[in-house]
Amino acid sequence: MSRFEGFYTDLYRRLKARDNWSVPTEAGFCFDGGIVTGSSTYPEEASQSFALMPGRPALLAIQTRKSMSEDQGQPLTKTLPDLRAKMDKVSSGSYRILRQGKRTVAGMDAEEVLFALKEGEITSYRFYLLAPGDPSTLAKPHTAIQLLLGASSPDLKPDEATSPVDEAGALQTWDTLLNSLRLRPGAV
């Protein structure tokens, strides 16, 4: 327990309450009702998932942490065989790659791969982005984003399990989301 004491002491001294509608001007990580201010002497990771349409399979997941030098040699394209195997498994091999390649997100170099899957009557989309970040600055953290629209489920009828948007809508949602990402003023 004593090995975690320093971590929790550091975290506790940096916690501040804040109104959810105010945008802090100081560096830190915001959460519902508060902010963890300043820099930590310990590594931190933030993960957040959002159910985009309650009752429908539509999920946005974002993970971010300080970038490390080891991240630079791990592009998303290296994991493409694993992602393809995953898509083969969930769609019985019935998928297409809508787009893959490099893009810039919030001033960071990133890679994306966007899949469209067909599972019988169910159409779904699995979009992935990885930005390895820049270890020399907190302004460019390691960032992974997933957008999942539609998924087969024994609890849902096919029209409820299919993506709530068509292919053009899925691509527009993804691009709008990624183009809206910015470093919060004063975050670093």
Image (cartoon, helix red, strand yellow):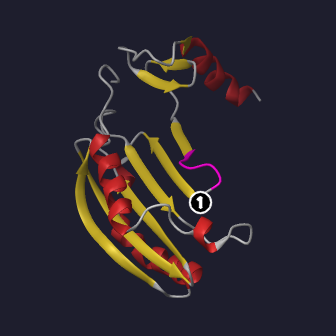
Image location (x, y in percent) of residue 152: 63, 72
Residue placed furthest toward the right: 1
Residue drawn where x is 39% and y is 18% of the image: 23
Residue picked out by circle 1: 57
Quadrant hosting residue 71: bottom left
Residue 170 lies in what quarter of the image? bottom left
Toward which corner of the image does residue 9 lie, by quadrant? Answer: top right
In the image, residue 36 lies at what x, y percent?
52, 20
Q: Quadrant of the C terminus?
A: top left
Residue neighbourhood size for the residue with mark 1, other residues' Cα within 10 Å, grouped as few (<14), some (14–19), many (≥20):
many
Q: In the visual, does 48 lie left or right of 141?
A: right
For the N terminus, which image quadrant? Answer: top right
**Camera-side residue: 62 or 44?**
62
Residue 17 higher or lower than 36, as above or below:
above
Secondary structure, mark 1, is loop
Q: Amino acid at mark 1?
A: Pro
Q: Residue at x 46, y 56 (%)?
A: 146
Q: Magenta stretch containing residue 5, yes or no?
A: no
Per the rendered image, the range of residues in magenta is: 50-55
The image shows residue 56 at horizontal and vertical percentages of 60, 57
Residue 74 in sight in this render: no
Q: Is residue 164 left or right of residue 157?
A: left
- Which residue occupies the extreme bottom position in the image? 93
Does 181 sit left or right of 58 as displayed? left
Q: Is residue 181 left or right of residue 159?
A: left
Please provide percent x and percent y for residue 57: 59, 60
